[in-house]
Amino acid sequence: MCRRAADADWRGGHDLVVRGFALLSCVAVVLVPNAHAAAPSVSVTASATTGQAPFAVTLSVSGDAASYAWDLGDGATVSGATVEHTYQTGLWTATVTAIAPGGESAQAHVEIRAESVSLGAPMLVTYHARIELTGALRPAAAGVPVTLSGRGGALGHGVTGSNGGFRIHARAGAPGPVVATADRATSAPFALVVRPMLTVSFAGKHELYGNLRALVRLRPASSGTIAVTVRRPGAAAATVGGRRVVSVPIDTSKPGRIVVAASARTAPGWAPAAKTASATIAYPRLAEGAQGAVIGVLRRRLAALGYAVPRPSDSFDSAFLDSVYAFAKVQGLSRSGIVDSAFWAKLGHPLRPRPRYLQPADHLEVNKPLQVLYIVRGGRVATIVPVSTAGLAGRFTPVGRFSIYRKVNGFDPSPLGTLFDPMYFTGGYAIHGNPSVPPYPASHGCVRVPMWIAPTLSATNPYGETVYVY
């Protein structure tokens, strides 16, 4: 203690105030203020900072604090040096507060990215068709590569935009799960439903006796099997089957509409597929020089209607042109020599000529307006032959009732030319063969018939046969 010779003033606390008096003798006492305690050291680590949501993370802290309090950033709080937490999609900041024994504190932070990818696509697509798949990475990040994968491997690639969205175009392959992978996240599988590609086409001519076939294809072949049904009016449906490609011959013996219905019996995972197509079997347009089975059909049809036709052939030659002319004349069609749609229509519903005269029951009639000859048997027109009567200036073919009085086998010279197998019915007028029998009057007066029919006429019409010309 200090003794003082004068007044001394003591104040509480740690300060000593001396008021200017001399100290006679003293022992010095020094009071040192308390030092402030240092903040605790703290550092934090995470088992991983980026992963797919829900993202399980282990957070650890090290330091010299007495306790640790966590704010995990998503509303959750917890304490401890090591904690485990599962984050949903988002960008989160976990903060730990370290508290020393004296109450001092310090903080450390770690950022956690829990990612997710969404994916959408059309509910039903066709095999090998170009499709668009869309999705987004969350939390959003731009420029992140995205890979689209299916059962057979990668289907396409893309990059996220500024909002995390992406758009990828790909070809539809096999059905099944499709996923998108961006950064460390993969979308939930999207069940892609694929319909196989089923096509129906026709090969050949869409005409009578055109050798037409229906071709049905299924792609891919592994998606199933094909069933094909062909229908046409008035006929029973026919069904065939197979895999990948089915070729079905089409009956073109009759005109009309053909309907081909194809379906795929698909394998598991593939959507059902069906396709219908039609073809119209039309009458062909024919002219001299045409070839094919349809010519034989036309010949037989004309013969059945009583028109004289040459020997059987699948060729539209000059002899058959005579038969076409004869039909066109009787039916009032254009005498062009073309078998067109009007010709075919008349062939289906033809006019049936009748003889002008009924007696005698067997006779010949030359119809000058129509330029045809009727061979009448039993009071009915049995055969129709094209003719060409007088057409030159100053010439005429006599009309009336006549009879065959002279016949010559082979060629018979005359002042106006050589006649082939002539049958004279009055004066020098005859029914005879000639290489040129146009569909209009062109003779000197005789009745020209085609060369190929003249021998038959001569052989089947005897002397005395009545001949009417009108």
Image: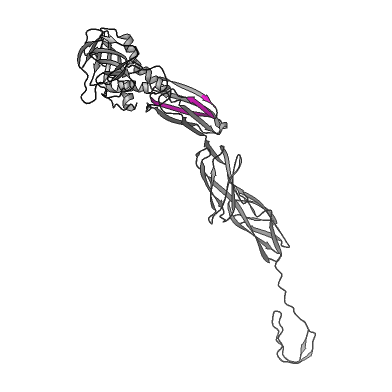
Residue 252 falls inside the magenta stretch: yes
Across and down, in percent, residue 455 comes to 34, 13
Residue 301 falls inside the magenta stretch: no
Q: Please, is residue 185 above or below residue 205 in the view?
A: below
Colour setup of the view? one colour
Across and down, in percent, residue 335 comes to 29, 26
Quadrant for residue 220, please give it.
top right
Give the total number of marks visible in the rendering: 0
Residue 348 relative to residue 81: left or right: left
Residue extending furthest toward the left: 400
Q: Nearer the viewer, residue 19 or 422?
A: 422
Across and down, in percent, residue 89 comes to 58, 51
Q: Nearer the viewer, residue 156 or 109?
A: 156
Q: Please, is residue 407 above or below residue 103 in the view?
A: above
Q: Please, is residue 113 above or below residue 197 in the view?
A: below
Q: Tell me which residue sits at (39%, 20%) in the image.
A: 297
Residue 402 relative to residue 268: left or right: left
Taking the image as drawn, is residue 468 in sight?
yes
Across and down, in percent, residue 412 comes to 31, 15
| Main SS class of the magenta portion in the image | strand
Quadrant for residue 377, please give it.
top left
Q: Quadrant of the N terminus?
A: bottom right
Taking the image as drawn, is residue 73 in sight?
no
Residue 246 relative to residue 87: left or right: left
Residue range of the region highlighted in magenta in the rendering? 241-266
Q: Quadrant of the C terminus?
A: top left
Q: Nearer the viewer, residue 95 or 39?
A: 95
